[in-house]
Amino acid sequence: MFGVNRLAEAIKKCSDNYTRDCYIAKFDLKGFFMSIYKPLLWRKLKIFVRSNYNGIDKEDLLYLIRKVVYNHPQYNCTRKGPLPLWNILDKDKSLFTVGENYGMPIGNLTSQVFANFYLDEIDHILSTIFLFYGRYVDDFFIIDRDKNKILKSIFFIK
């Protein structure tokens, strides 16, 4: 609900309380969680922790973060449901079909937090280009009064 309210607020502001035209594009990063490159995520997290955390347990924290990032739950799990159903699951929705250094389990809280962290640089870029920008993990929107700017951005963002 937070994301919906944020979008509604952005539309209201961009349109000057619904008195001006504004244009909206909504995006979903297809297969995002399975495309996360673990070495890049780990590198970014390590730099962030080393730069911003000064607790005496810093190395313990880094050890735990690395364990979570490089965890492979697909190697030690019990599959539920008929195997034929697993075989028809989209390849970009399953840890069973990604490479060794790719993918995060979608349902894990740490995956959600790390995914937000992973895309932080994109947030900074898009929020400087468009009047309004919002993201919730792998779904985001851009709003602007310039329709052509949004249309041109679709090719860049894809």
Image (spheres, helix red, strand yellow):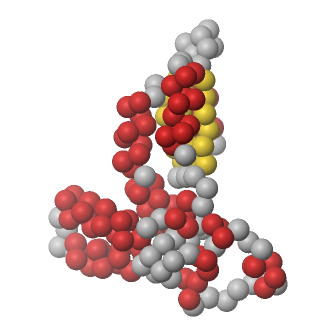
Q: Residue at x 61, y 29 (%)?
A: 24
- Residue extending farthest to the top is 19
Q: Residue at x 29, y 74 (%)?
A: 61
Q: Quadrant of residue 143?
A: top right
Report whether 45 appears left or right of 78.
left
Where's residue 86, x and y in %?
Answer: 75, 79
Q: Which part of the image, by quadrant, shows the N terminus?
A: top right
Figure check: 110 above or below 146: below
Q: Quadrant of residue 81?
A: bottom right
Figure check: 59 above or below 76: above
Count of number-bearing discs: 0
Answer whether residue 17 is visible to the viewer in this image. Answer: no
Where's residue 49, x and y in %?
Answer: 25, 64
Q: Residue at x 55, y 67 (%)?
A: 34
Figure check: 72 above or below 7: below
Where's residue 52, x and y in %?
Answer: 22, 58
Figure check: 8 above or below 71: above
Where's residue 26, x and y in %?
Answer: 62, 38
Answer whether residue 151 is visible to the viewer in this image. Answer: yes
Q: Residue at x 22, y 77 (%)?
A: 59
Depth check: give the residue in front, 56 or 142.
Answer: 142
